[in-house]
Image (cartoon, rainbow, N blue to C red):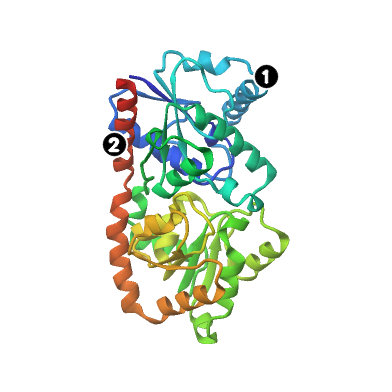
Amino acid sequence: MKVLIDTYPLLVRSAGVKNYLYHWVQALRRAAPHGSIGALPEIGNDVELHHDRSMAGILATTTGLATLALSNHLSVPILSHLAGKADIFHISSLIRNPPRGPLLTATVHDMTAWMMPELHLQANRQADSHLANNLRRAHRIIAVSEATRQDAIRLLQIPPEKIVTIHSGVASAFFHVSADSVAAVRTRYQLKRPFILSVGTIEPRKNLSTLVNAYRALPAHLQDEFELVLAGPIGWADPETTARVRAVRYLGYVPERDIAALTSAATVFAYPSLYEGFGFPVAQAMAAGVPVLTSNVSALPEVAGDAALLVDPRSEAELRDGLQHLLLYPNIRAAMSERGRQRAECFRWDICAAKSWQFFQELSAR
């Protein structure tokens, strides 16, 4: 059996989908027989994950995106030719016209464009509408959480038996962060005080204005002792949110090689997102042993389990009180850290890959 995975999102700016594809393909190749997992386009395993640019060279990126455009806009059956003798083609988020020969599978990461369209650009909503067409055509679908699975069933009328939940994973770097790497990151980003950390693209869904307001509402002595540090590229946030983000400690885009150590260095990880299909930063923080404050909505309670403090993300008071509670009580932070590490063991990429390979085998055996 040959599975070909659409990796075109690795050629563009992307966050969660890119993270998933990069680690998932590598883990699948460890789990499956040699030569069973292909990628279109093929990206070398030694390439560093980078969210803010293409992971291929200029020529490969230009060729890949031109191929994608020809397939999408001119309906040229070029992907059917490139798919060759693949038995299964696993589609991501950019292809509109998948190859016709192989069985079609897909991963659905979230349904936020349907549930909160006002928080997204028109281009994002349009891309998700094309993905929805492919999800309806797919023979089987992976959902990265049960919450996302239920949303997809309800909003896209996908038959429940067609879509299965396979949780995403956490890179091994987050489970084993050395003291030296933490010290190096503190020096590199001049992090001299203990800090609350939030990582993610600066966009409306991440709810960062409310987080900043909650931090500013903390007692002055806690603001003096702990600073609020935000990391991530500027996405489509409005100018007011961007200004508020820049008014605290904003690091901008942080390379992936620094994220594990930066996360591990934090006293508390805060992630008050309004909707997540999985929530990589929360799972990563738990793996690094950092106490987590996150939202009680979407997939976040499913991922966090009993290892995080859950609050209403739209309540500035709940966010403030949650932050204060964690900052004031080191013993509570220590207990949450231990529970978080244990919970994160559920989200190993090797576990995800083993379940995914079984998913493909079951489809092929039909």
User: What residue is disc 1 on?
Assistant: 74
**Which residue: 29% across, 28% down?**
32
What secondary structure is found at the residue carrying circle 2?
helix
Q: Quadrant of residue 179?
A: bottom left
Image x and y of residue 186, in percent? 46, 65
Secondary structure at badge 1 equals helix
Residue beneath label 2, please?
Answer: 354
First reached walking from the N terminus: tag 2 or tag 1: 1
Residue 109 visible, this angle? no
Q: Which quadrant: the C terminus?
A: top left
Distance Cα–Cα, label 2 vs label 1: 37 Å
Residue beneath the point at 31% across and 47% down: 348
Q: Residue at x 49, y 53 (%)?
A: 276
Give the amino acid type for the residue marked by disc 2 in the picture.
Ala
Crowd tier of the residue under label 2, counting other residues whose Cα lies within 10 Å: few below 14, some 14–19, many 20 or above:
some
Quarter of the N terminus within the rendering: top left
Q: Give residue 260's position: percent from left, percent from top.
A: 41, 56
* Residue plotted at (28% across, 53% down): 345
From what the image shows, is residue 230 above or below residue 167?
Answer: below
What is the crowding at mark 1: few (fewer than 14 residues within 10 Å), some, or many (at least 20)?
few
Residue closest to the eye, 281 or 361: 361
Asked if residue 328 is positioned above or below residue 298 in the image, the reply reads below
Can the viewer see residue 263 in this picture? Answer: yes
Q: Position of residue 308 (x, y in %)?
A: 38, 65
